């Protein structure tokens, strides 16, 4: 079956314009001093730092492969290249929209349903929820592993110890709550019914037909979602494969700050890397309404590095160089992916008449 011919609509043109506007707004608001960043980077050994940049690309590739396993298991056809582009687009949106924990995932659901139809919405949501549950479990495992390694090397700071326990407990409780709701279909249907009833009461029945249609669509998506989650439960092999790729993602993710410290000629313990990376990931997952994730992760990283025995000056420099890769570099790559995905249909549509004539 041939893919449908791309159509140029106002939505197709709007998204590239939004991307361009976000790009220039980023430059204007944060007044990025490119020469100062370059000067900081030149103090590092370029070979391990360049390797860290390459590792960042591979990390996202394995993350995409991990998610793709779950998507394909639910019979949504998605190539590795396509999933890679979708994840990069999601990273771009996560960076500019102050809802980091859900905005990129919502975008991936939109992209799949846009290409493959509304009937895939529930399955797409299920793939992302399952992927997030696996990621939360890995986050807890990394936190505990880092703490165990640190215990064998030195006496751990009580504040850091309590923070690790608090985050590990908080993530675990959240994981269990999400899992509980994921397998309780009647709970979801009751919540949908309650929200629609509240909407009809507030609008005094003026949106009765519209809200009824929304309820039907929401119930259909919820049923598809819960059926998909039950499929995951019956086939743990797909979850195991996804978890394997996710573990590789963590290996490459942790390698980035380690290589940055190597470039500064001050290798640090893997326990420091594990603890700091896991805590920063937990902090970043909180939707505090901060576009570009600026400020909080940098403060957290510098403070943790210093608390774990790294000199303050090296901590700040390592944080800057790491965030140059994990934030700014990824923002630009995500921007390129966004432009490619949104502009390619326009280019294809513009070229199609000439192809037909030929």
Image (cartoon, grey):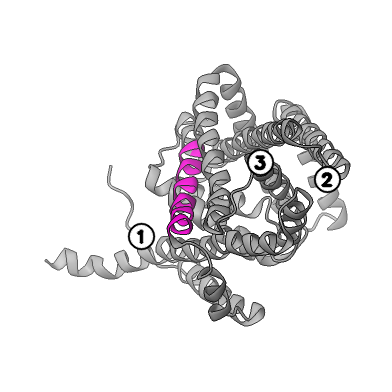
The quarter holding residue 127 reads: top right
Q: Residue at x 62, y 60 (%)?
A: 318
Q: Which residue bears the numbered disc 3? A: 274
Badge 2 density bin: few <14, some 14–19, many ≥20, Cα 10 Å = some
Task: For marks 2 and 1, give the one nearer the viewer.
Answer: 1
Task: From this view, report whether residue 351 is shown above or below residue 283.
Answer: below
Task: From this view, report whether residue 210 is shown above or below residue 186.
Answer: below
| In-front residue for pair 79/298 | 298
Q: Earlier in the sequence, mark 2 or mark 3?
A: 2
Q: Residue at x 58, y 51 (%)?
A: 257
- Real-space Cα distance between discs 1 and 3? 45 Å
Q: Which range of residues does the magenta coloring cover?
A: 47-67
**Quadrant location of the C terminus in the rendered image:** bottom left
Task: From this view, report whether residue 346 is shown above or below residue 161.
Answer: below
Residue 308 position within the rendered picture, expressed as x and y whole percent measured from the top left? 75, 48
- Real-space Cα distance between discs 2 and 1? 39 Å
Badge 3 density bin: few <14, some 14–19, many ≥20, Cα 10 Å = many
**Quadrant location of the N terminus in the rendered image:** top left
Visible residue check, residue 295: yes
Residue 221 position within the rendered picture, expressed as x and y whole percent measured from the top left? 62, 38
Task: For marks 1 and 3, give the one nearer the viewer.
Answer: 3
Q: As drawn, is 197 to the left or to the right of 220?
A: right
Q: Looking at this rendering, what residue extends furthest in the left direction?
A: 358
Dominant secondary structure of the residues highlighted in magenta in the image: helix
Residue 264 position within the rendered picture, expressed as x and y whole percent measured from the top left? 56, 59
| Residue 6, label in figure | 1
Residue 18 position within the rendered picture, expressed as x and y whole percent measured from the top left? 55, 72
| Residue 184, label in figure | none
| In-front residue for pair 230/45 | 45
Q: Which residue bears the numbered disc 2? A: 197
Element at badge 3? helix
Task: From this view, report whether residue 354 is shown above or below residue 277.
Answer: below
């Amino acid at each position: 079956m041939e893919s449908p011919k791309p159509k140029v609509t106002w939505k197709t043109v709007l998204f590239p314009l939004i991307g361009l506007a976000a790009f220039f707004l980023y430059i204007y608001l944060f007044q990025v001093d490119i020469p100062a960043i370059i000067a900081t980077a030149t103090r590092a050994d370029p070979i391990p730092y360049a390797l860290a940049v390459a590792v960042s690309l591979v990390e996202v590739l394995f993350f995409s492969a991990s998610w793709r396993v779950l998507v394909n298991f639910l019979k949504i056809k998605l190539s590795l290249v396509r999933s890679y582009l979708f994840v990069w687009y999601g990273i771009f949106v996560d960076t500019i929209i102050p809802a980091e924990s859900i905005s990129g995932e919502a975008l991936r659901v939109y992209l799949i349903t846009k290409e493959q139809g509304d009937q895939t919405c529930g399955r797409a949501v299920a793939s992302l929820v399952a992927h997030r549950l696996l990621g939360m479990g890995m986050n807890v495992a990394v936190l505990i592993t880092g703490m165990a390694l640190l215990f064998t090397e030195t006496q751990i700071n009580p504040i850091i110890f309590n923070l690790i326990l608090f985050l590990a407990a908080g993530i675990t409780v959240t994981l269990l709550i999400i899992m509980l709701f994921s397998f309780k279909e009647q709970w979801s249907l009751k919540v949908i019914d309650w929200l629609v009833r509240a909407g009809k009461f507030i609008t005094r029945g003026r949106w009765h037909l519209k809200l009824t249609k929304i309820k039907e669509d929401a119930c259909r998506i919820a049923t598809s979602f819960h059926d998909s989650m039950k499929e995951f439960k019956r086939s743990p092999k797909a979850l195991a494969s996804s978890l394997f790729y996710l573990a590789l993602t963590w290996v490459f993710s942790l390698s980035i700050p380690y290589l940055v410290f190597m470039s500064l000629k001050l290798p640090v313990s893997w326990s420091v890397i594990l603890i700091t990376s896991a805590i920063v990931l937990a902090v970043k997952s909180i939707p505090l309404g901060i576009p570009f994730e600026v400020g909080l992760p940098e403060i957290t990283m510098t403070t943790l590095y210093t608390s774990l025995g790294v000199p303050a000056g090296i901590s700040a420099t390592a944080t800057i160089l790491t965030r140059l890769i994990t934030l700014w570099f990824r923002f630009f790559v995500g921007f390129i992916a966004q432009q490619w995905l949104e502009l390619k249909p326009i280019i294809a549509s513009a070229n199609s008449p000439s192809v037909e004539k030929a």
